[in-house]
Image: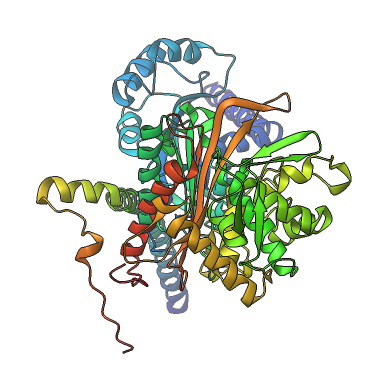
Amino acid sequence: VAGGALWIAVAGVLLVGVVFMNVAVLRLNLQLDSLGRERTKLRAENAALASQISGAANSLKIEAQARKQLGLEPAGADQIGYLDLSK
Amino acid sequence: VAAKRANSRIRLLLAVFVLVFAATLARAAWLQGVRGDALGAMAQSQHREVRTIPASRGTIYDRDGVRLAIGEQATTVYADPRQVTNASGIARAAQRIFGKDVVDANALYPQLRDKSRAFVYIARKADPDKAAAFAKRGFDGVGVQPEERRAYPQRSVAAALLGFAGVDNSGIAGLEYGYDKLLRGTPGEQTIVRDPFGRAIDTISSTPEHEGSDVFLTIDHTIQAQAESVLRATVQKWGAKSASAIVLDPRNGEILAMAQAPTFDANKFARTNPALTRNRAVTDAYEPGSTFKLVTVSGALSEGIVTPSTRFTLPYSLKVADRVVHDAEQRATETMSVARILSQSSNVGTITLAEKLGGPQLMDWMGRYGFGRTTGVDYPGESPGIVLPYDKWSGSTIGNVPIGQGVAVTPVQMAAAYAAVANGGEWVEPHLVEKIAGHKVPKPARRRILTPSVNAEVAAMLGNVVAEGTGVEAQIPGYHVAGKTGTAQVPDARGGYSSGKYVASFVGFVPASKPRLVVLVKVQEPSGAIWGGSVAAPAFRDIARFCLQYLEIAPDAPGH
């Protein structure tokens, strides 16, 4: 009788283990799906930000802003000096 | 009696149980055996979903790592009209959320009502946030699909060069087309199981996506934008039809800019005149005029027929077969050296040299410079230009080909030819791509055209063109510049020349003592002035001056 009860207890523990494992797998799958969505969202945001950076790097735009907001002008050829370090 | 009645009731109950059990069994057998497959498939379709994982198209970068073409995430919203229960609600909500320029409710509504269709686009490649807001409304029969939308953040910069990718994300024109196989990735696929609440509870199978390769160009976006800006100003100033420019590093054949005006916003290519989207520097051939004299003069020098100081007595005009050729400006008969023939761009002098060189030799020199065949630039649709085979020459051909008439070249061919002189007489294959997916592309082809001594003579003569000849407008303070002007009439469809239509060009290199840049400018059909020296040379000067400063190239003629 004691041996039978032991087997029933072992079977019970195994069944509970199987249930817990399935629940854990389910949770991980849900987490995976959620992470997958987040990855897609972050990639989209990353691409959008990269696009904005590139748009902002347009040299003519930067030049126009520098002229307008800071009053800067490109240096003339006579305003640039070069040092020949080989001499 | 009571016991008998009880027995019969028990039998009746048993019969009822047997009947119910038999009916249940029969139903189970029907569902499992006969309709099992169909119902199984239906169940699967309700909780299984095959999801496509889009592969990102590779990014196109300039030489400094600035993104010129990039894939942005977008969401396509669609409907299955057979499952749609609220067509008017969907149409109204779609127009309100996506905007009328994307969704027209009046056009969408009848499509959603058409039960013979199984698929209707509501918004293709829409803003993901708007698509999510729309999906949240929970309309029956509506689905969403993530997709990638190609974007060109610098808008018009290098638009014709980059080309564009269409709605299905495949390259249609330009580098997007030429490198489509490498740029486009392979989409992945995932089969998932969803619970009744739509949550993914299991992944049955998964094939990962393979992203497209990134392509790094030799183009510098700052030089490209500056060249486009100069060309825009040139087109406006001279009322020209269009203009093209190439900036090239003669040492290695790297193209730093390939610009044209007018240009277009690559994000709006579908609404752009197709003529504007052609990269004319590679695809369009033109009669070069005097810039072609380089071939004749360097050929005559290389064959030992003349030296730069060999003098000829040259009349203003010369009869060649049935044709009379004259110089651009009226003058008396004068004695000119070969160097002066080039600096003054004398047609009569150049034809005199060509007659001494001979037709077959001239053809040979055209071939050495690469005219009549593609340069091999890594861009689709390159034109080889037009060179008449020697057996098709007429008696007057020797009177026009040596001065760049009756022959058609592309700007990239001409830039590569002058780059050869700038590179000590060695021709280098021009190219636009530096790296693909982090790997360097094979080294460009090289071949020697001129001996170093002849090359030095040619370079010095081209320096004279800018110092005291037709190209003085190309002078840049502090630098020695070498180059050649060109002015050519535009051929018409009847085999003659259009009256009043010209192509003005200038091609040169700087600093002439140690060339770092070759710049070609070609202006199509300017008005007011037509000469390469007055229309194209100033544009050359402006582009080259900017590049010298931007690339911090030290002057070779300080105080000059």
Question: Tell me, what colour scheme is on the image?
Answer: rainbow
Residue at (34, 49) in percent of width and height: A51
Between B81 and A3, the one nearer to me in the picture: B81
Image position of B6 with respect to B349: above or below: above
Which x, y percent locates residue B55?
51, 51
Image position of B488 with respect to B359: above or below: above
- Locate residue A10 relative to residue B226 in the image: left or right: right
- Locate residue B316 relative to residue B87 in the image: left or right: right
Between A35 and B342, the one nearer to me in the picture: B342
- Asked if residue B382 can be seen in this view, the reply is no
Which x, y percent locates residue B125?
43, 35
Image position of B173 with respect to B23: above or below: below
Residue at (67, 75) in percent of width and height: B451
Between B432 and B67, the one nearer to me in the picture: B432
Between B553 and B72, the one nearer to me in the picture: B553
Image position of B497 with respect to B455: above or below: above
The quadrant of the image that shows the C terminus of chain B is bottom left
Which x, y percent locates residue B266?
44, 38
